[in-house]
Amino acid sequence: MYLSTSGVYGDCAGARVTETRPRRAQTPRAKRRVAAEERLRRFAIRSRITLTILRVPGIYAPTRLPLERLRHDTPVLRGEDDVYTNHIHADDLARAVVAALYRGRANRAYNVSDDSELKMGEWFDLVADTFHLPRPRRVAREIAEREIAPSLFSFMRESRRLSNARLKRELRVSLSYPTPREVLAEIAPRALSRQLPLPIDDLRASRRPRMKR
């Protein structure tokens, strides 16, 4: 089994993407994954073994949320420039891996994605609202390219909506988290309850310089 990336498809202009879509990787990272897929396919055929490829998008979990980006005021694209992004909960990815070990077909690829169809800005807004943080600024693409680190901005150059029909039909995976909203609804109350109330007035008072007598 090989865990690849949904980036192998490249930019699809927001179209729905099945596993039969030609791979047109654009980033060096995704091109390396295409090369790895091809090398492993040849090895599997030559060795007469079963290879299953899972194409994985952004993985999220209680410990894998973009909270630091929100706290650092990282902007996102404005609505007319925004791109579709795809997600999978870490637990559902683990279920897909186990299912593929038992039910994966030889030399078969599967998109491992949830049911959500969120644009990147909507994803950041959802996390911000859940954790009572300011929503990120919306900026034009040319401004974002100047302000955002190249590694992050590379994800804003591509837009696609992964189809998970084959995942459900052939691997019979039932998603515990069909959209990120389910996990955010679970973890946000617990995360907020762990935040101790800060006695602002007492803190300010403790920082006031004391008058010498």
Image (cartoon, rainbow, N blue to C red):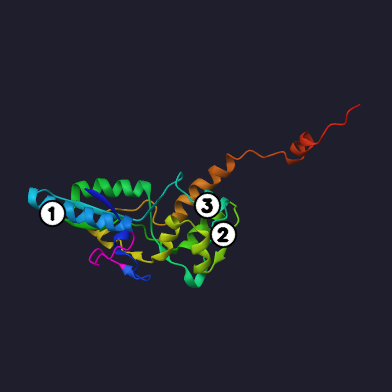
12 over 92 or under it: above or below: below
**Identity of the amino acid at label 1?**
Arg
Inspect the image, locate mark 3, and give the three-letter code of the amino acid beneath it: Arg
Find residue 79 and report its horizontal and vertical position in percent. Answer: 51, 70
Mark with earlier residue (3, 1): 1
Question: Tag 1, which secondary structure?
Answer: helix
Please name the amino acid that badge 2 sits on.
Pro
Indicate left or right for 120 with 23 as reference: right
Per the image, the residue denoted by label 3 is 69
Instruction: Give the quarter of the image for residue 170.
Output: bottom left
Residue 117 visible (yes or no)? no
Query: Label for residue 42?
Result: 1
The alpha-carbon separation of the residues under discs 2 and 3 comes to 9 Å
Within-10-Å neighbours for mark 2: few <14, some 14–19, many 20+: some
Question: Which residue position holds label 2?
Answer: 136
Marks 2 & 3, CB-CB < 8 Å contact = yes
Residue drawn at x 31%, y 46% as measured from the top left: 94
Q: Is residue 210 above or below residue 170?
A: above
Q: Is residue 38 left or right of residue 181?
A: left
Label 1: how many Cα within 10 Å (few below 14, some 14–19, many 20+): few
Q: Which residues are magenta?
A: 17-27
